[in-house]
Amino acid sequence: MPELPEVETVARSLRARLVGRTVERLETSGLPLRRPVDAARIAAATVGARVEAIDRIGKYLLLRLSRGDVLLCHLGMSGRLLFVSNVQEVPRPPHTHVVFSVEGAELRYVDARRFGELVAYKVQELAHSPELAALGVDPLSDGFTPAWFAAALDGSRRDVKQFLLDQGRVAGLGNIYACEALFRAGISPRRRADRLGPRRAARLHEAIREVLARSVERRGTTFRDYVDADGEGGGNQHHLAVYGREGEPCPTCAAPVRRLVQGARSTFYCPHCQR
DNA sequence: GCATTACCCTGAAAGC
DNA sequence: TGCTTTCAGGGTAATG
């Protein structure tokens, strides 16, 4: 499941391949993703345009194109963006929904569960798009300061785990890294956000940055579907302390890791180390 | 403002 | 072995 480190890894691997190249053709499967794919709009934005830059905001990938268009891509649960240079030798995998032909190579959007999204905007529309307008602060951006984070926590009475998953607050954290950051900070996922206090808030801020930075270094976490633009899996799954480890010993105290359900999502935590 | 539930979807795992 | 059921989860929307 692509969260911030996975999307960042895709952005980096794509950047090396795609920037400076021109899109020549667009093909789509015709099947809807989370929303219908507007092939005509995407073609108008991309075909004949050069890829000028690739950015990331939260879990969104931004392909900035010449002529002032931006292609916004969310990988959902199982989405992959694959850059394939030897097109003849590598057949398109099942669930290939969008293909950009790029100077003899292909950028393929593959998504078995079709929870992803691909949408084009004019650059001046982007900030007001429904996807980005409601997004909170990216935890690897300069705006993610301890003071901002503490104030945001103070303004929410939800469980801190729920708070962390809210993309309108912190943009880019998903279930894996929310669990890992809370473990690292020694904070119970059930603690109310506005009851962390300044010391825990500072610890959690630091833990979020740390957990994300380490995972970016390891090129993300591959559980099932995630690979980068070159088809390579990440390495962070070998370094998870609690996520997906129900019943296994906590790496700190050896107590069994527990699982609880918050907002219909599994939370993994150590009841002994996290208070 | 927040909790809960349903929905979209497929493949892996579990259960029989 | 092979079939059926359950579960996983990001984001959105409806409802309370």
Image (cartoon, coloured by chain):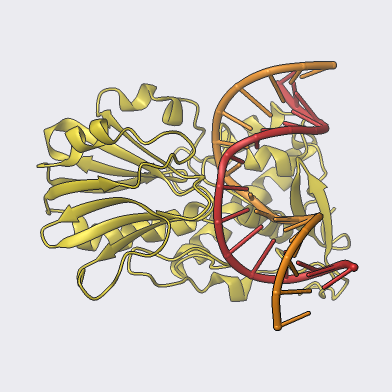
Chain colours: A yellow, B red, C orange
Q: Nearer the viewer, residue A151 or C9?
A: C9
Question: Percent position (x, y) of residue A171?
Answer: 52, 40
Question: Percent position (x, y) of residue B11?
Answer: 57, 65
Question: Percent position (x, y) of residue A178?
Answer: 65, 51
Q: Quadrant of residue A122?
A: top left
**Left or right: A17 with respect to A133?**
left
Residue A176's place in the image compared with A255, above or below, is above
Residue A123's place in the image compared with A199, above or below, is above
Residue at position x 15%, y 55% in the image: A102
**Left or right: A1 with respect to C1?**
left
Q: Quadrant of residue A70?
A: top left
Residue at position x 46%, y 43% in the image: A58
Residue at position x 51%, y 74% in the image: A235
Q: Quadrant of residue A166?
A: top right
Question: Percent position (x, y) of residue A32?
Answer: 43, 39
**Quarter of the N terminus of chain A within the rendering:** bottom right
